[in-house]
Image: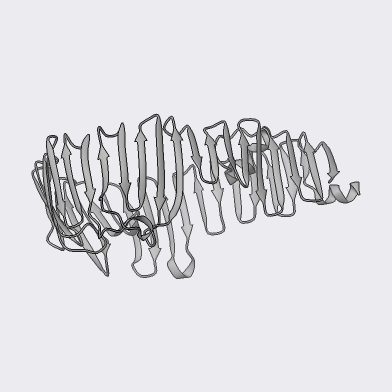
Amino acid sequence: MLSSLLLAATFQIGPFYEQRPDYFALRPIVSHEAEVTDVLWPVFTSHRDWWRFCYIVNYQNHGAKDGYQFSLLPIWFNGEDKEKGSYAGLFPIYGRHPHIMLLNDFEFALWPLWMRYKMPRGRDRLETNAVLFPFISWRSDGAWSFWPFYGLNHQRESDHQYALWPIVTWAKYRADRDTAGAGYSWMVWPLYGKVKRERERQTMYLPPFFSYTKIITDGKGRGGVMRSYPFVRLRCPWPFLELEDMPQRIRISFWPFYESVENYSYKDGSRVSGVKRFGWKLVEIYDDETRVFPFWASSKNFTRVWPFWESEVDGEITRSKCLSLMPIRWDPAVERNWSKFWTFYESESTKAYTNHSLFWGLIRWRTDK
């Protein structure tokens, strides 16, 4: 039994060397698991179709379908796109990129002197040009801006304008089933603001510190239950005191001491999730998990007592280890390259038995249940 157990288990030499059928590591120099190889992580990581060096030099090969991309952040990029062809850029001199962040067909010259890009709007793509960004810009739908003096911005269901931003802003809204409906809003910052729409009324004093919002419905509340009073939100003052009774959320916040949130389904108004927080996010109590950052985390399948113990259920197997110095949830790269240096004990448990490993496999034993 002992020999079969050793053959099935991991072969280790302290925390430095580890090998099993799907894994190899010579820590902290190199590790390999499945399609990922690390060298002095986080210095270098490679995958089947990408690699990166110090998170500055990046290469992605999307195959014959989509081409490749290389970048030396933030100075240089080049690549090939199936639809757009070859592209390159030397920042801030000149460049053209088919897809960067949320922008399409991005092009610049002597940035911020000039740039142009497109963004999706339904089935269309709006083109934006900017000169001396962010001061002068104009868009293919007629929107334009001479910041901070005046600007006009068209949205799908509204038109927004400003003068001497952010001092004076105003907007006009068209009827739309997915928003608060037709109406208008305006604000003279930091003194006063008002919103009047079909399904929303809001008054702001010294915005954003004091505001009162009322949501007008057809009389139905969460879960389709009839109610004779509107949904409301009160900030007095923000961010220290916030009270919400909204169609999709009930929230009480006394920042940074206490917060209670309950979320409801947009479709049928049923309760979806909830959380209570103490000390901002130091203590969080969810429906299925409790966190005391960084010392404690407990759920149905996961338990951490930082920095001593961590246990996780994966199907019918429960894996545990000691020590567990990472204060956040499991990170694959840290597990491959560094965690073994402080993990002195590990175990794998099933309904029938538990395999134990102490001091990187120097001592192994099995207990039957």
> Left of 234 or right of it: where is 331?
right
Residue 337 lies in quadrant: top right
Pinpoint residue 67: horizontal percent, then vertical percent: 44, 65
Which residue is found at the position 26% from the left and 40% from the top? 234
> Left of 339 or right of it: where is 354?
right
Pinpoint residue 103: horizontal percent, then vertical percent: 30, 57
Which residue is found at the position 51% from the left and 45% from the top? 287
Q: How is the image coloured?
A: one colour
> Left of 364 or right of it: where is 305?
left
Question: Exactly how many numbered labels are in the figure?
Answer: 0
Relative height, residue 120 to residue 77 (above, below):
below
Relative height, residue 55 to residue 126 (above, below):
above
Does residue 65 appear anywhere in the picture?
yes
**Closest to the observer, 331 or 280:** 280
Residue 239 lies in quadrant: top left
Which residue is found at the position 60% from the left and 52% from the top? 36
Relative height, residue 255 to residue 95 (above, below):
above
**Closest to the observer, 191 or 221:** 221
Which residue is found at the position 25% from the left and 60% from the top? 218
Pinpoint residue 275: horizontal percent, then vertical percent: 46, 42
Pinpoint residue 329: horizontal percent, then vertical percent: 56, 41
**Closest to the observer, 310 or 89:** 310
Residue 346 lies in quadrant: top right
Does residue 111 appear anywhere in the picture?
no
